Amino acid sequence: MNNDVKNEVEIKGNERPDPSPAVIRRLPRYYRYLCELIARGITRISSNELAHMMHVTASQIRQDLNCFGGFGQQGYGYNVNYLFAKISDILGVSAGFKAIIIGAGDLGRALVHLSMFEKRGVDICALFDTSNEAEGKDCAGVPVYSIDELEKFCEENQVDIAVLACPKHLVKDIAARCVSLGLKGLWNYMGVELEYSDKDIIVENMHLGDSLMILNCRICRNISCDDGESE
Amino acid sequence: MNNDVKNEVEIKGNERPDPSPAVIRRLPRYYRYLCELIARGITRISSNELAHMMHVTASQIRQDLNCFGGFGQQGYGYNVNYLFAKISDILGVSAGFKAIIIGAGDLGRALVHLSMFEKRGVDICALFDTSNEAEGKDCAGVPVYSIDELEKFCEENQVDIAVLACPKHLVKDIAARCVSLGLKGLWNYMGVELEYSDKDIIVENMHLGDSLMILNCRICRNISCDDGESE
DNA sequence: TAGATTGTTAATCGATTAACAATC
DNA sequence: TAGATTGTTAATCGATTAACAATC
């Protein structure tokens, strides 16, 4: 059987294939620039203008957006509000995910205080303390529980995401507990490698140490290395 | 601190070309795995074994390392300690960079408390407060100054890097001051886009909000998207 | 209609993988 | 020497850019 035909059959209906990781990683940046355009009251933009603003090619913008659907209009460009709404949806801003933060130390508390979660539609419903120091207190209006209550809380509430900001040596064990509890995602700040398949849970890493070293390295060699980043 | 490295590349006809951003971004992960091997007392490893551990191809490892030089030996593999030393050097661990943190709020304080800087050979020599609240105190042994003293401090000390962890609306102004002061690098946590050329200063961004959205998106679509990451 | 700009296909470029000769 | 494993070249793959027909 002709391979082209076979593939078309396998991709049910006329569904698009999964966008590549590279495309996914560029979306938040579109999101940010569209926010900015909305704030400035701009309601319409062409791929060329946006490309100029963002220092990328217009071709890339059109290709990226067309992974998800035709959001523009020939001869007109893109409606900023409509495009923003579409990208927000793709990025799960309206998915209403509930998250907990594990670790009520400096880092955990710093994260709660950032407006980031609220802006991205993620609801922080609890902090879990691993040192029995902050337990019972609250932090920016979010209650702090003992890590011992993790299972009970997750079973009683629909928790989707755990932010890992606890001591390094506890990370693997706590991550495993989150997987058992059926959580959907781990946002890992501790630089510990977590090896799960995407079927078990989605892991997104914030490797602070790695980023610092890349900065060091780029300074030493004067290397422009922005490609891998979202900027 | 070796300002002449880049020039060497340009002058000597035989030098290797600049490694691609993709290669640079993979180095910290090699660094971490080599740390682990050293901790386990393993002194020798083949690209095949390492590839297996790291879930990458042996080909990629050999290609990556050969961007910088022949660190292995045919028939033997790689000496773990030697390779670790080489990669540490490339990553500027021994460059002795001095850094300041701008913003003595939750985030700034959380960063000082992480052992990350020390482990990577970066010396945090001061925090700068933008709210006149923490001024005069100290944080994990690091003195806190008013942001008004930024210029004076940087002129009297050899500061290389500024970590931007201050309120969003101050970021652009403070970044510009850092550029004027001749700093070499900015490590930007605030999600604000900074547009400088690499000649002015090297900017490395930690876009927390972007990462959160990518996690959201991957959960929604069940997409394995690890490629862009360092894991 | 004419001009503008998209959506999409084709061409190019770069990065990853495979293969193998060099060599320890 | 024989076996192992690198360093490096060649082949493949995917992602970016360019071009252009479709169409608003």
Image (cartoon, coloured by chain):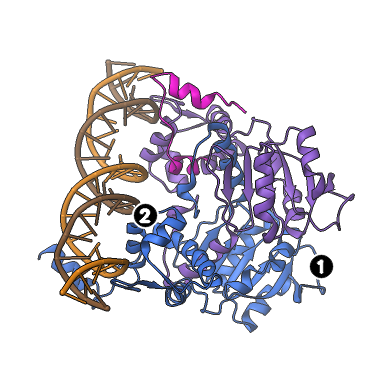
Chain colours: A blue, B purple, C orange, D brown
Secondary structure type for disc 1: loop
Question: Residue at the spot x=73%, y=32% of the render?
Answer: B158
Membership of B4 in magenta stretch: yes
Q: Quadrant of the N terminus of chain B?
A: top right
Depth check: give the residue in front, A229 or B215: A229
The chain holding disc 2 is A
Few, some or many C-alpha atoms within 10 Å of disc 2 (few <14, some 14-19, many ≥20)? some
Residue B197 percent across, percent down from the top left = 52, 42
Pointer 2 residue: A57
Between the residue at mark 1 and the residue at mark 2, the CA separation in whole angstroms equals: 49 Å
Q: Which mark is residue A134?
A: 1
Q: Amino acid at mark 2?
A: Thr
Residue A201 x/y as whole percent: 50, 67
- Residue A180 vertical placement versus D3 (above, below): below
Residue B143 picture quarter:
top right
* Left or right, B231 with reference to B134: left
